[in-house]
Image: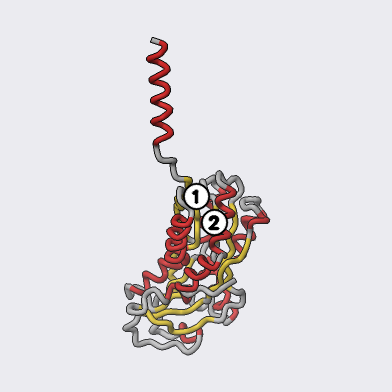
């Protein structure tokens, strides 16, 4: 009987050793404007690091930070602005010495491709033809915060309140204008480049604050070493080439 037990135990151990190792999972929360680029970066990282699986979560930067604050199991956070990351750092939700900038972008005003409207300056948005203008919620969406800042600087924020349609993230603003549900929308240049057949850039908007993207390891990450390695990959030549393909500028 003892021999049978030992034989069974030996067989069980052999079976366990022969099973493929479970993939190491890395949870990454990233700004909605990074959806396409980070999807490709995640695949490239997995290919270069066999046994690692990258799980991606996209949304408005402010919303993502709130998820982290409530205990979401996130390893890496990539924001579309410095302000949101600053807030996370002050609260102790990110590992400060892991923080780094990895990309830049630009704010633009887009219109439906078949729209007959033209925009020479932001003041044109006060014309009657512009009835609905999409903009990210300034409280949680960096693109909305940048948009509010340029409108306020031009003395137009209050005047346009009745026409503004606030969205949960920049991709929602993009979808609204692509479907012709709004007359214009504030998005990033990289977003505009995704739908050249459905939208067109009406105006390049000079943001007072540079549009920079920071990335950091989240405090309490279950895989801090892998998280730092992923950040290094994003900043590597391979990661930067993918970001460049989608229109992002280097840090």
Label 1 crowding class (10 Å Cα cut-off): few <14, some 14-19, many 20+?
Answer: many
Precedes in sequence: disc 1 or disc 2: 1
Residue situated in front as seen by the camera: 50 or 224: 50
Q: Which mark is residue 124?
A: none
Please name the residue shown 57% across and 82% down the image: 154
Q: Quadrant of the C terminus?
A: bottom right
Please name the residue shown 62% across and 62% down the image: 100
Q: Position of residue 76 (x, y in %)?
A: 55, 54
Residue 181 position by quadrant: bottom left
Residue 168 visible in the snapshot: no
Disc 1 to disc 2, C-alpha distance: 9 Å
Q: Quadrant of the N terminus?
A: top left
**Vertical position of residue 75 compared to residue 199: above or below:** above
Mark 1 and mark 2 residues within 8 Å of each other at the beta carbon = yes
Q: Position of residue 137 (x, y in %)?
A: 49, 65
Please name the residue shown 51% across and 78% down the image: 159
Label 2 crowding class (10 Å Cα cut-off): few <14, some 14-19, many 20+?
Answer: many
Q: Element at badge 2?
A: helix
Q: Element at badge 1?
A: strand
Q: How is the image coloured?
A: secondary structure
The residue under label 1 is: 26
Q: Position of residue 93 (x, y in %)?
A: 62, 51
Q: Residue furthest top?
A: 1
Q: Position of residue 193 (x, y in %)?
A: 41, 76
**Vertical position of residue 207 compared to residue 220: above or below:** below
The residue under label 2 is: 230
Residue 15 visible in the snapshot: yes
Residue 56 position by quadrant: bottom left
Residue situated in front as seen by the camera: 47 or 59: 47
**Vertical position of residue 70 compared to residue 165: above or below:** above
Residue situated in front as seen by the camera: 110 or 226: 226
**Vertical position of residue 177 compared to residue 224: above or below:** below
């Amino acid at each position: 009987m003892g021999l049978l037990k030992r034989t069974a135990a030996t067989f069980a151990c052999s079976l366990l050793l022969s099973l493929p190792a479970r993939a190491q999972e890395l949870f990454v929360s990233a700004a909605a404007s990074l959806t396409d680029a980070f999807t490709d970066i995640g695949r490239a990282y997995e290919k270069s690091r066999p046994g690692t699986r990258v799980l991606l979560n996209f949304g408005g930067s402010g919303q993502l930070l709130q998820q982290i604050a409530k205990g979401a199991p996130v390893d890496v956070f990539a924001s579309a602005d410095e302000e949101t990351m600053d807030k996370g750092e002050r609260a102790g939700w990110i590992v400060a010495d892991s923080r780094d900038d990895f990309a830049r972008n630009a704010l633009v005003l887009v219109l439906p491709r078949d729209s007959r409207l033209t925009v020479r300056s932001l003041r044109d948005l006060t014309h009657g033809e512009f009835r609905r203008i999409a903009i990210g919620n300034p409280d949680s969406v960096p693109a909305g915060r940048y948009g509010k800042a340029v409108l306020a600087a031009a003395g137009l924020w209050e005047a346009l309140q009745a026409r503004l349609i606030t969205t949960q993230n920049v991709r929602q603003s993009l979808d609204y204008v692509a479907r012709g549900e709004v007359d214009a929308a504030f998005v990033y240049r990289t977003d505009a480049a995704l739908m050249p057949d459905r939208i067109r850039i009406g105006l390049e908007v000079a943001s007072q604050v540079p549009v920079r993207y920071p990335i950091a390891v989240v405090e309490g990450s279950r895989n801090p070493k892998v998280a730092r390695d992923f950040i290094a990959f994003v900043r590597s030549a391979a990661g930067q080439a993918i970001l460049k393909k989608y229109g992002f500028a280097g840090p």
